[in-house]
Every structure is written in structure tokens, then in C-alpha cells.
Amino acid sequence: MSGIKDMVTELCQSGNVLLVRGSQPPTVYQTLNAQMCLLINFMCEAFDRRSAAFMPELLSTLGPAVVLPTIEMRRSGYRSSVTLLSMLLLGALYQNYSGAVVLPLWWAVHLAFSTRHYVPLHPHFAEATFLGYLLGYLIVSVAMTVYQTSATVGVWQLFPVCVFSIQALYLWYQRNNTEDVPDCPYEVLQLIHVTNFCWSAVTHAYTLFQALSSPNPLEALKHSFYPRFSPASLALFPTTAQQFLKWDILFIAGATLVAGISLLRGARSKLLAFGWFILGSTFFGMGAGLSGIWMWREKVLEEDRRASVAKLKEE
């Protein structure tokens, strides 16, 4: 990690500061300029057009890790304000210290100290989470993928702030709205997972198409899905950045998978979920594999809720 940081720092010091090239940054950005330069240059190098066809799929794989901690923390009984502020902090730590380190630690702490007595999510919170994910992460990621400019990369680096702001604004807007509120947020939560499933499937198909239509399909597939760590693979900075991101996403997806399986009940369900993840990741991408596990989890929780409501009516 220190070697990668040294490479990017050299780019910034040599004048290749993509965010503020040619002008003095505004005062409000001065304290953040050095860090933003590191992050923006790193991502711009990783998006090297000649060898980064897999980058859109990496972003879709990160999707579940962006939204699931919010859902599970609120479901564990934490207040909405505490949940949103915690997710903002988690996102800031991820962007600065690598999700491969931060997210596994967060899931470990959450699973160790949270109870299994879940609090029903308010539909407005679920709607805010969907809008934050859609507008603050998914669309921002697609814009960065399409345009690949310093501006879009800079906005993507701030996606935790975007997601937080959209969620907070929507909850503030709905704070006094008690009319036409659904009984439960099940449909909205499933919409979140279905959206990420579809995004993952599209980007996975794009990665496969690019790899299979290349002169050397096998080597292209290995480059897209197999993270390496060798002197030969780290010879060029764009390759170094790409290898780092592939390892980063691999650890993030692994932590999310372990968390999802841990939250399911029974050995059979856990084994089926793991089997689905292998098959789903192969045909639709890891983002879809993870989303499928949470679609199953939401279905089980909704069946429990309906059974509980039916039991209360009988009494």
C-alpha cells in the first residue's frame, strides 16, 4: 500500500494534479487537496482504457457493500441518525484506508455485538436507502465509468457524502408524512437488491464480451478476474492500481459473503447460499451473487413478519 501511495504522490508532486491543474484550489478545498489528488490520480490510472474493461464490474460488486451495512445496522435497532452518520464515517474510512481492511472489521464488530431481535425498518428509511444507493452511488459510478474525467472521479470519491446527503434530505422531507405509508418496506428492499443484481449482470456480460472478443481470450479472462501480486504484474502504475483494486474488491466481497451466510439460519440454508454465490458469481457477477443472498434473507424475514401478523390476528 505504501508503494502505491508513493507512486501517486510522485504524480501529484510532478504537477499532474487532475483536480486543480492550472489554478489554485479554493480555500475550502485546500486541506483536502493532497488527499483528493492521491485518490483521483489513483482511480484515473486504474481506469486505463487499454486494460480496464473489468472496472465497471468491480464497481457493481462494491454495490452490496455500500448499501447492506446501512440496512443491517438500522435493523439491529440503531436510530436512523446514528446509522447514517456511522455509514458516512465507514465510507470515509473505506475511501482513505481501503475497504479490504475496514469492511471486514465492521462486519466482525456488527455480528459480534448486534442482537438477532430485529427492529422493523420504516418504509421511509428503506426508500431513503434506495434513493441514496441509486443516486449517490450507482449513477455516480456509471458516470465515472462513461466519462472517466477528473471531475467524475472526484465526485465518486465523495460518494459516501452523496449517499448520506440524499438519505438525510429524503428522511427530512418525509418527517411529517404519515399518509399512504406501506405496512412494510419489503418491496423497496427487494428493489435495492434486484437493481444491484441487474447492474452486476450487465457489467459482468460486458466484461465477458470484452475478454472473449480479444485476441487472447484466456489471458483477458485471467486479467479481468484473477488478481496477481508479482513483480511482473506491478511493472506499470495502471496495472499496479488495477491489481490493488481487484484484491480490494475480493476482500470486500468475501466479507460481505461471510456476513450474509452468517445471518441465515441453519446449515442447509448456509450451504445453499454459498452454492448460489458460486453459480451466481460465475454467470452474473459477484454483485449479483451477493444480492441474491440478501434477496433470500429479505424473503425469509418477510415470511416471518407475515406469520407473526397472522398469529396476532388469530389471538
Image (cartoon, rainbow, N blue to C red):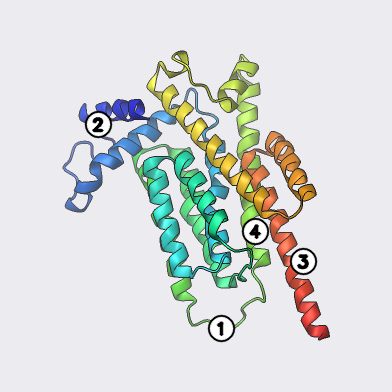
Residue in view at x 46 percent, y 13 percent: 232
Q: Which residue is mark 2?
A: 12
Q: Are marks 2 and 4 in contact (CB under 8 Å)?
A: no
Name the N-terminal-most of marks 2 and 3. Answer: 2
Determine crowd level at label 2: few under 14, some 14-19, many 20+ residues with C-alpha closer than 10 A: many
Q: Which residue is mark 3?
A: 303
Q: Nearer the viewer, mark 1 or mark 3?
A: 3
Q: Quadrant of residue 235?
A: top left
Residue 162: x and y in percent read 41, 56
Q: Amino acid at mark 4?
A: Leu
Q: Which residue is mark 1?
A: 178
Using the numbered discs, state the Cα–Cα distance from disc 3 to disc 4 in whole angstroms.
17 Å
Using the numbered discs, state the Cα–Cα distance from disc 1 to disc 2 in whole angstroms.
51 Å
Using the numbered discs, state the Cα–Cα distance from disc 1 to disc 3 in whole angstroms.
25 Å
Q: Nearer the viewer, mark 2 or mark 3?
A: 3
Residue 188: x and y in percent read 63, 64
Q: Amino acid at mark 3?
A: Glu
User: In the image as oriented, which residue stretches furthest toward the front?
Assistant: 112
Q: Is residue 66 left or right of residue 153?
A: right
